[in-house]
Image (cartoon, rainbow, N blue to C red):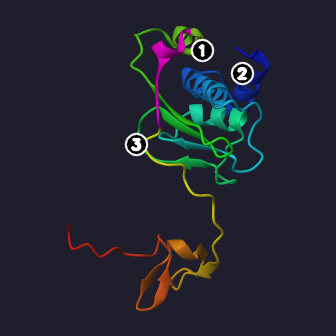
Amino acid sequence: MNETLWNRCVAFHGHSCPGLAIGFRAATEALAYLGVSDPAADEELVCVTENDACGVDAVQVITGCTMGKGNLLYRGTGKMAFSFYCRNSGKSVRLCLKALPDMEREERRRFILGAPLEQVFSLGAPRFPVPEKARRFASVPCAVCGEMTAEHMVHLVDGKPHCPDCFAPYDRGW
């Protein structure tokens, strides 16, 4: 394990924990599998995380994938799963945490970081194609609150844009 890189992840996250170890191991294994050695400068590497837990911080530090660059996407399934895509090579991989043996917190962290990969993660192809590159959208003021909102997020009500916070969905109970 790369101690310097682990320490950078701990410093970014704020503490050492098994959750951070999950993201650390997933990111380092994915980069090795994809043949990528440097963090993403732009969108050449993409990660779709299926959780919003501690491990995502390690993914950001190691891969350079961030929400702001548009190459870290959240797909909330509640699974400890990460899909990585390399746009340059076309390679991709999905790592999903396996059920782990019951153990104390520190022992669990060490197991995640040091056990053979096949004991920690299942590896396979992502369940969806590489996401499109990030797009830029104009901002429009919400007719109710006045806050600027990306145009692809507004809903029209009587022809006036409503932000997601001000929009009242019409679903009639369905």
Count of residue discs: 3
Residue ID for mark 1: 113
The reply, left or right, for residue 149 in relation to residue 36 is left
Among numbered discs 3 and 1, the one appearing first in the sequence:
3
Q: Label 2 crowding class (10 Å Cα cut-off): few <14, some 14-19, many 20+?
A: many
Is disc 2 placed on a helix, strand or loop? helix
Q: Using the image, tell me which numbered label, if any, was put on residue 6.
A: 2
Which residue sits at x=71%, y=32%? 36
Residue 141 at x, y = what percent? 60, 82
Is disc 1 placed on a helix, strand or loop? helix
Q: CA distance from mark 1 to mark 2?
A: 10 Å
Q: Using the image, tell me which numbered label, if any, was put on residue 166.
A: none
Which amino acid, mark 3?
Thr
Which quarter of the image is occupied by the N terminus? Answer: top right
Work out whether 127 lies above or below 7: below
Residue 48, quarter of the rendered image: top right
Which amino acid, mark 1?
Leu
Q: CA distance from mark 2 to mark 3?
A: 26 Å
Residue extending farthest to the left is 173
Q: CA distance from mark 3 to mark 1?
A: 24 Å
Q: Using the image, tell me which numbered label, if any, was put on residue 77.
A: 3
Foreground of the two, 155 or 46: 46
Magenta residues, start to end: 115-125
Foreground of the two, 111 or 54: 111
Residue 139 at x, y = what percent? 63, 77
Which residue sits at x=63%, y=73%? 137
Q: Is 116 within the magenta?
A: yes
Among numbered discs 1 and 2, the one appearing first in the sequence:
2
